[in-house]
Image (cartoon, rainbow, N blue to C red):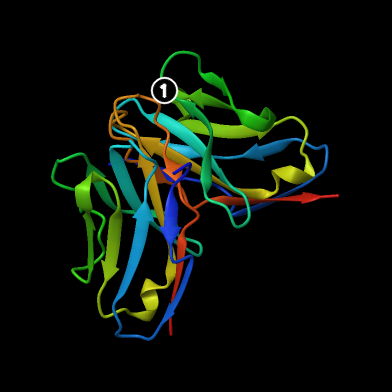
Amino acid sequence: GAGVSQSPSNKVTEKGKDVELRCDPISGHTALYWYRQSLGQGLEFLIYFQGNSAPDKSGLPSDRFSAERTGGSVSTLTIQRTQQEDSAVYLCASSLRGMNTGELFFGEGSRLTVL
Amino acid sequence: AQSVTQLGSHVSVSEGALVLLRCNYSSSVPPYLFWYVQYPNQGLQLLLKYTTGATLVKGINGFEAEFKKSETSFHLTKPSAHMSDAAEYFCAVSEDFGNEKLTFGTGTRLTIIP
């Protein structure tokens, strides 16, 4: 596609439920990132995928969070047993590593509200 | 470990006035520095970046930033604010240009007063 696509754009769920957030990166981009944007907290790095390498999961806040990237393209971020503190906007970004541009291309985000 | 500090979570300037958004960084190696802008209900987009070479970098929409190693700063400026500049601005740093894994500041929301 022309840009990074994320779905759903908004998700309201009850505490304890599982949620899945989807990211479709720009075609051909080898790197994919998930960030979390909370009010007053800026952007918090969650996880990074690069090609066939093992993902960098160093930013995942707990074992309730996981992500996968199938076929080197679409990625799904899963949050199990959601808590109210998980409420945030989850941003996905992609880049073409090796171009040395330093530029990430962001989607519009998925806003998660946990009641 | 790298980090970014943005002074002022909210900045208001009059239309036509100078815009100055402050960013200081901490890095153990020569950093790569970025400013991203997020307009309402949109994703972040790159405004400008410093990698190597000239320390004064120019970006889109008339913005520029200067890398000052001695001050560990990368402040964003624009000589004359326009209403369309109202947005949230994020400073970011990377120590590894190859993987584009960025550490972001907490953001500064810029409001333009008519």
- In the picture, measured across the screen, residue A45 lies left or right of residue B73, that is left
Residue at position x 57%, y 40% in the image: B22
Can you give x and y, in whole percent of width and height, for residue B98 in the image? 28, 29
In this view, the residue farthest toward the front is: A1
Placement of the C terminus of chain A among the 4 image quadrants? bottom left
* Amino acid type for the residue under numbered disc 1: Thr
Secondary structure type for disc 1:
loop
- In the picture, measured across the screen, residue B47 lies left or right of residue A3, that is right
- In the picture, measured across the screen, residue A9 lies left or right of residue B89, that is left
Q: Quadrant of residue B102?
A: top left
Q: Quadrant of residue B81?
A: top right
Q: Quadrant of residue A103?
A: top left
* Disc 1: host chain: B
Can you give x and y, in whole percent of width and height, for residue B91 in the image? 49, 41
Residue at position x 29%, y 55% in the image: A75
Which residue carries the number 1 mark?
Answer: B51
